[in-house]
């Protein structure tokens, strides 16, 4: 017998579209306060309000043992020297880990452990896997010239805690310095650099 009640899901690894799933867009205006160069942010917003990233989420079920997943698409671009990126978050249920798999494009994941503040920057390109441990803030960053597309798979109970990062942001920023992706401590970054 074929279990028809479990749907077959298809996606496009280049556009990040999941058939039948409406993505949620995050526009530049939704990211107020996240980019370090507020002058560059305001100047860009005065021109237009592009979609910085979108996420198509699939939540098949809730409860113990269940998983949710989402395909993220981050547009290429910068605000000042800082690459387009996600807001980043902790999971509301701190022990919840997550697996990210790069599908297309070029970028990085910035991880920051909550208790130690330890930072890790890992490439997230096609065929890269990044394991995000529990209690670790995670942000995805597009350093390439085409959309960065990835899938994240996490416990259904994980939830999103955006508050801590919205308040204090990550300790470091990933910026383009003479064409090189460079991680700089937030408090040492100067706009002229
Ligand atoms: C991902 C993220 C996605 C968007 O599905 O939600 O990359 O990033 P923000 O949620 O930080 O805006 C995930 O990590 N879920 O847990
Ligand atoms: Zn997450």
Image (spheres, helix red, strand yellow):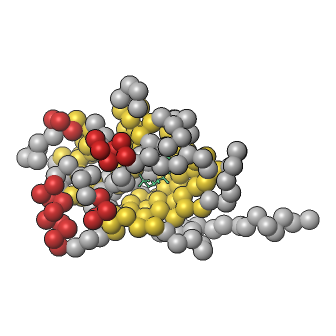
Give 51 or 129, whichever is nearer the viewer: 51
Give 85 or 29, whichever is nearer the viewer: 29
**In the image: residue 36, left or right of residue 123:** left
- On the image, the x and y values in percent for residue 190 come to 11, 42
**In the image: residue 55, left or right of residue 168:** right
**In the image: residue 187, left or right of residue 138:** left
Q: Is residue 150 visible?
A: yes
- On the image, the x and y values in percent for residue 162 come to 40, 48
Picture quarter with the C terminus: top left
Q: Residue at x 55, y 35 (%)?
A: 95
Q: Is residue 115 above or below residue 96?
A: above
Which residue sits furthest top? 116
Q: Residue at x 17, y 48 (%)?
A: 178
Give 144 or 171, whichever is nearer the viewer: 171
Picture quarter with the N terminus: bottom right
Q: Residue at x 45, y 67 (%)?
A: 24
Q: Is residue 73 above or below residue 191?
A: below
Q: Residue at x 84, y 64 (%)?
A: 3
Q: Is residue 111 above or below residue 27?
A: above
Which residue sits furthest right? 1
Q: Is residue 129 visible?
A: no
- On the image, the x and y values in percent for residue 31 come to 29, 58
């Amino acid at each position: 017998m074929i279990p028809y009640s479990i749907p077959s899901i298809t996606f496009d690894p280049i556009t990040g579209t999941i058939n039948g799933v409406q993505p949620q867009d995050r526009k530049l205006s939704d990211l107020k306060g996240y980019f370090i160069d507020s002058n560059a942010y305001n100047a860009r917003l005065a021109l237009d309000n592009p979609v910085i990233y979108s996420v198509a989420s699939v939540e098949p079920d809730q409860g113990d043992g269940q998983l949710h997943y989402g395909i993220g698409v981050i547009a290429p671009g910068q605000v000042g020297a800082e690459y387009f990126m996600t807001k980043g978050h902790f999971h509301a249920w701190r022990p919840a880990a997550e697996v990210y798999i790069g599908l297309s494009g070029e970028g990085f994941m910035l991880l920051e452990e909550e208790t130690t503040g330890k930072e890790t920057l890992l490439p997230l390109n096609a065929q890269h896997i990044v394991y995000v441990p529990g209690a670790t803030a995670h942000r995805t960053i597009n350093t390439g010239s085409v959309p960065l597309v990835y899938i994240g798979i996490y416990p259904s109970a994980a939830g999103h805690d955006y508050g801590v990062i919205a308040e204090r942001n990550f300790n470091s920023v990933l910026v383009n310095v003479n064409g090189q992706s460079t991680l700089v401590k937030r408090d040492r970054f100067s706009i002229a650099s």
